[in-house]
Image (cartoon, helix red, strand yellow):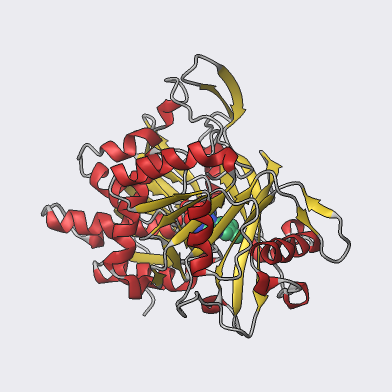
Amino acid sequence: MSQQLPDSAQFIVVGAGVHGLSAAWHLAMELKARGRGTGHDIIVLDKTGPGGGASGIACGCVRNFYMTEPIHALLRHSVDVWMHDPVAFGFQQVGYISVGEENQISDYERIHRSQNAVGYPSDMYVGAEARQFLTNIWPDFKTDGVDVAIHERVSGYAGTRQVMIGLAQKCADYGVRIFSGVEVTGYNLQGGQVVSVQTTQGEIRCNLVIWGLGAWTPLHWRMLDQPLTIECRYPDGQAVSKDMWTYWRLLEGEVYDDRPYVTASGLNPPVLHVELMNTPVINPATGQPLKDYTYVYYKNGNERMDKPGLQGGTVPVKIGPQAAVEPYGHANDVYQAEAEFADYLCAAMGQTMGRFEGIRPQFRERRNGGIGAFTPDNVPVMDWVLPNLYMIADSNHGFKMLGAGKLVARYLMGDAVADLQPFAFSRYAEGKTFGSTNSHSPWV
Ligand SMILES: Cc1cc2nc3c(=O)[nH]c(=O)nc-3n(C[C@H](O)[C@H](O)[C@H](O)COP(=O)(O)OP(=O)(O)OC[C@H]3O[C@@H](n4cnc5c(N)ncnc54)[C@H](O)[C@@H]3O)c2cc1C
């Protein structure tokens, strides 16, 4: 049944990705629980439809291996949401294991302490114990160079398409209306506040706007004349001028494998992430190094493949402050993953487990893209852009952060939400910019 686009709505959510839909669903529940309205007060607008952006193509890993400690609590809320209805969201709570070398042991210790302090249970293993732990799960794990491992028991992965359907259904259950094919083209302001949004199907008056715009956030940031560079102040007193948004393109892909990818006890294995900063990945075909470090993650990919196999990826590639966002994702010719990525992924998989040696011919050749807009410190920003326009910008690693919408909904109802505070935009001016991390990846 097609719905009539209203000419006014109390709340307009722009973008039907994980954050827009989670925020809309949670806001509807909060309004109802507090007797302050219903989901009918909320509309979600998406120029394509649910999953038209990164949320529809993400790898789907849900983990909490972050050197930025405030993220740990955010992920605890997120796993609560994933486990609220794991079937509807396609969530597989298989756990997550991160593996490192000696140079990261102190980082692992901090992460392990902080995760457990906020109620996110993880175990840590060092030295021979780490190697034993890994070979107990994967008997063919090649443990040379491995010095440390963390096992997050409540992490896992989700089918990206399934969660979009699940979230859209949750919204519908609470009366939230989602309008696909409606593009927001501008904002009408009065006294610095949004009074209406312009769309390809007319103007809609509103009281409050929430952005869940993913890679399109910088475009709307520009529509509102927000600063393109900002001064980032750090706790040590340093100040650095940085681009507000930096695009990166992701490198992910799939490998067919007819053999079941299972643990020694026959179970679906935890998501695996290996970063060995001092161990090169060697191309088995040439004997030449592909990169001077190992960074790879992989998991079962059956939920998104036509035949059995695994999905994985490596460190993304920086593009810069400008990028061609359209067409998005796999459709964009400019940001396709190169053949070298397939060489690297397959070689790294073969270096971590004996079963994947020689797997390169089984790489699934297909169009493979996806970009994201990162914040100045690569950590989410969740805050007001204008007094009645709230932004959820996850810095392109927040498919897992289903709890962001839950916290934002409470905050918009007037609650003080301490776990959101570290993600305020004001951190850059206040000397609370997050620092760099001991990793090749921008998202730890
Ligand atoms: C290839 C890839 C793999 C990833 N893997 C993981 C992973 O394993 N784990 C993880 O946690 N994160 C992962 N991420 C990051 C994660 O997918 C994103 O951070 C997250 O999905 C962003 O969600 P969102 O709701 O903010 O934006 P999106 O999902 O991008 O949604 C934004 C929506 O806004 C709509 N829109 C844009 N402009 C307009 C407009 N003007 N009017 C109306 N609608 C508009 C779009 O159509 C889109 O549907 C990955 C990202 C990519 C690209």
Q: Residue 277: x, y in percent?
A: 66, 44
Q: Residue 279: x, y in percent?
A: 71, 48
Where is residue 353, by image quadrant? bottom right
* Tally of numbered discs: 0
Q: Is 6 situated above or below 439? A: below
Q: Is 271 situated above or below 14? A: below
Please name the residue shown 67% across and 70% down the image: 354
For the N terminus, the image quarter is: bottom left
Please name the residue shown 25% across and 71% down the image: 173
Q: Is residue 294 left or right of residue 114?
A: right
Please name the residue shown 56% across and 71% down the image: 139
Instruction: Say whether residue 244 is visible.
Output: yes
Farthest residue, direction top: 237
Q: Residue 210: x, y in percent?
A: 38, 47
Farthest residue, direction left: 35
Q: Is residue 220 left or right of residue 156?
A: right
Q: Is residue 437 left or right of residue 109?
A: right
Closest to the observer, 179 or 31:
31
Closest to the observer, 177 or 377:
377
Instruction: Say whether residue 46 is visible.
Output: no
Q: Residue 201: x, y in percent?
A: 47, 60
Closest to the observer, 2 or 318:
318
Farthest residue, direction front: 128
Closest to the observer, 367 or 251:
251
Q: Is 325 situated above or below 342? A: above
